[in-house]
Amino acid sequence: MKFFIDTANLDQIKEAQDLGVLDGVTTNPSLMAKEGITGRENILEHYKKICDIVTGDVSAEVIATDYEGMIKEGEELAKLHEQIIVKIPMIKDGIKAIKYFSDKGIKTNCTLVFSVGQALLAAKAGATYVSPFIGRLDDISTDGLNLIAEIRMVYDNYAFETEILAASVRHTMHVIDCAKIGADVMTGPLSSIEGLLKHPLTDIGLEKFLADYKKGN
Ligand code: E4P
């Protein structure tokens, strides 16, 4: 299972990278705005900075919502760095753009996916990743994890190569449940990864080991 961090914050990306288990980064226009990164040039520069920190895939989202605009922006993003994955919304022109990029060998991440049908369409168009947003489904009292399970079943039925990128992960249990279901990737905040470290018996056990060592030395 790949671990992506869902942020545009360079310090958090560095921290996750230093842990040695990071496989990539996802960003979106809201995450960029949160870091105060505005203006096309600054945004492109920021993507390059992220690529310099991590070794894996970095999703960079197009702003255009029409086919021509998405192609223009996506080609510009893909040229920025070999690690860039062009992130495209699940809309009609988005599917056409994913197909275009797939035919050209440019990797894509189909974002804002909330149903199995949408995921099926993304796979048919040749998306590299499909991003079902589990946290946002949970927010409206719908089972986000069930969507991951259903997409897993459909993709396995037909051996689609599109990777299921569980997005909108909010906490550590989401990570564990996605791993049980068989999501290929999860993207979440640093806290969702660091939460995996924690167990009180580990802390108690370590404290006792160190205390016993001190007694004999
Ligand atoms: C996915 O690529 C999105 O950036 C992200 O996971 C959305 O998460 P949120 O619902 O917590 O905003």
Image (cartoon, helix red, strand yellow):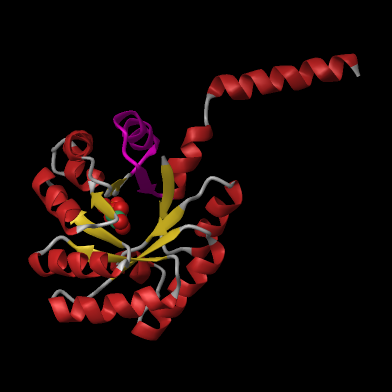
Q: Is residue 28 visible?
A: yes
Foreground of the two, 184 or 63:
184
Q: Is residue 114 visible?
A: no
Of the four image quadrants, the one with ligand 1 is bottom left
The image position of residue 164, as x and y in percent, is: 28, 45
Q: In which quadrant of the rendered image does the N terminus lie? A: top left
- Segment tinted magenta in the rendering: 170-189
In the picture shown, does residue 103 fall above or below 192?
A: below
Residue 130: within the magenta?
A: no
Q: In which quadrant of the rendered image does the C terminus lie? A: top right
Name the residue located 13 percent from the left edge and 68 percent from the top edge. Answer: 96
Foreground of the two, 83 or 17:
83
Foreground of the two, 30 or 58:
58
Q: Quadrant of residue 185?
A: top left
Q: Quadrant of residue 37?
A: bottom left
Name the residue located 27 percent from the left edge and 79 percent from the top edge. Answer: 73
The image position of residue 205, as x and y in percent, is: 65, 18
